[in-house]
Image (spheres, helix red, strand yellow):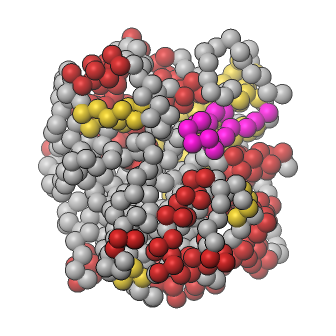
Amino acid sequence: MVTVFSNGPFTTRPEIRGTFGCAAATHWLAAATAMRILERGGNAFDAAAAAGFALQVVEPHLNGPAGEVPILFYDARTGKAEGICGQGVTPAAATPERFRELGLDMVPGTGHLAACVPGAFSAWLLLLRNHGTLRLKDVLEPAIELAGGGFPLTLRVARTIESMRALFESEWTSSAAVYFPGGKAPEAGALFRNPALAATYRRIVDESAGGSREVEIEKAEALWYEGFVAEAIDRAGREPVLDSSGQRHAGLLTADDLARWRASYDAPVSRNYNGATVLKCGAWTQGPAFLQWLGLLEGFPLGELDPLGDEFVHLVTETGKLALADRDAWLGDGDAPLAALLDPDYIAQRRQLVTAMSSAEFRPGAPGGRLPTPVPLQEAVAGDTPAGVGEPTFTGAIGEPTFASGSLAEAALAAHVERREGDTCHICVTDRFGNMVAATPSGGWLQASPVIPELGFGLSTRTQMFWLTPGLPSSLAPGKRPRTTLTPTLVLRDGLPYLGFGTPGGDQQEQWSMAFLLRVLHHGYGLQQAIDAPAFHTSHLVASFWPRDFKPRSLSVEGRFSRGVIEALEKRGHDVTVAGDWTLGRLCAVGRETIEGAPILRSAANPRGMQDFAVGR
């Protein structure tokens, strides 16, 4: 039975509490899918995997079957917190020299050239095989039903599809066949189907059937990475397609690249903070920057500050600039100096850089005495819309996903896609057995690359995260993981799961997550209260997506901050942009706590955009 407390502060929705299971996701159908699996006797791992596959169907502008996912989880059976890397690697042929031969100084944000190995499918199957209890058919069934039978399209998906009309009809015609059936744009609220995707997952279920559940899952994985899916991806990538460079390029990804890769366990990085242990994924994500950021904040009396006041916002922002500068200079798949970045003495030195005024400098440090390779800085053009602010605007060069108008019908294509940084999803689940999962799927957006007709989905373009500049942790090399922005968070107390949460948002993910966690740990906010609280973020960082700009002193705040707080931030030197009242952040969270000796499960979801949902009982 769910208990709703009415004597606390007002929230847009109740914080869900129960004892059986709780889930939250960036789409109500994914949250409902997770609860459906829990009700059928599955555990949190079964439920998260099923919800992850459902999200690929219902939020195709935010993630797809060929996308990627980092996963953090606690398994009560083993008593361990672990991570799974569902980020695929670059093709064997992906070298800086190859891109320069094509006349490129940056990896395009769309098309086939930026494709890397799809990682999400193997990651969900690894979680399911080793920690779940249900068969693959049970877990894929909801996604097959949604893709084949249809689901009501949200307004945001409908608008995104319509914005792609010029490109789809003139160039990516295989995408037009899926998203403009009969030449008609899908309407918000109407049923939308993707029969080809349903058929792909149905074929995987049918052809992998037989034997133990573990054997079935292994056969399904082989079908994807060595069978008909890999073969279709190989064929599609050989076709030149128009991308954000304004030119047509074939891809570099081959079936051999897929055959060589599988998802793997990835030990989380952790930090003790204010009575809790915070876990993040490794240096192939931006997660370690979050832990350094917490270390920087340890030197300030956050618990004594108004969590909606200017000093709180200022300190979180200024320490965040330092942590994110180190992210840009040091994090990546390879020789990241994590121990030095998280060393207390190094963090104490960095903390001294924080003053009462906003800094305009890009200031990565020298952990362990190592000097960073200079990161290319490109200041944003004056008047650009700050990332994540207000309603999306139309532009010729955008963030995540990306497209710039090219030579074909430039005037029409310039408005073909919305500027929207943070096109990602999140799912988190906790169950009566003591398990907890937090996962942030992304990539393979419908805007990223053309649909492969026989599969019903396009490829991920995460290779755009790399620099062609040599010497950086995120410099392009074959078989390397992009340094992704995807970054779920798991928090333990006394060695047991306490919180699991995450958000879409690209470079804003850690920023919105930080404010949420601080308000919970320092100010006693409930999950829904912390999600509802006015959000803020800076773009004083090197953008992770094309065109990779830098916006010194920028600070975007929701309009629900008081006028006095906004003016005080401006006096501190912040270049403040006031966004709409409910426009920044899309957090979902689950939690566990013990009240009078009994475990209580919790969940909460973001009200912004009116589609995230939390469920439980």
Q: Can you give x and y, in whole percent of width and height, for residue 478 in the image?
A: 35, 74
Q: Name the residue: 57% across, 42% down.
A: 609
* Depth order, front residue of 163/248: 163
- In the image, the segment drawn in magenta is 603-617
Residue 208, image quadrant: bottom right
* Depth order, front residue of 188/471: 188
Q: Can you give x and y, in whole percent of width and height, for residue 325 in the image?
A: 25, 44
Q: Is residue 616 magenta?
A: yes
Q: Name the residue: 25% across, 47% down.
A: 383
Q: Can you give x and y, in whole percent of width and height, for residue 69 in the image?
A: 53, 57
Left or right: 186 with respect to 175?
Answer: right
The number of callouts visible is: 0
- The relative height of residue 321 versus residue 221 in the rendered view (above or below) is above
Q: Can you give x and y, in whole percent of width and height, for residue 204 in the image?
A: 72, 75
Q: Is residue 270 magenta?
A: no
* Depth order, front residue of 129/177: 177
Quadrant the C terminus occupies: top right
Q: Name the residue: 63% across, 44% down.
A: 611
Q: Looking at the image, can residue 480 be seen?
A: no
- The relative height of residue 592 versus residue 46 in the rendered view (above or below) is above
Residue 604, image quadrant: top right
Left or right: 578 with respect to 529?
Answer: left
Q: Looking at the image, can residue 296 be seen?
A: yes
Quadrant the N terminus occupies: top right
Q: Name the residue: 66% across, 75% down.
A: 181
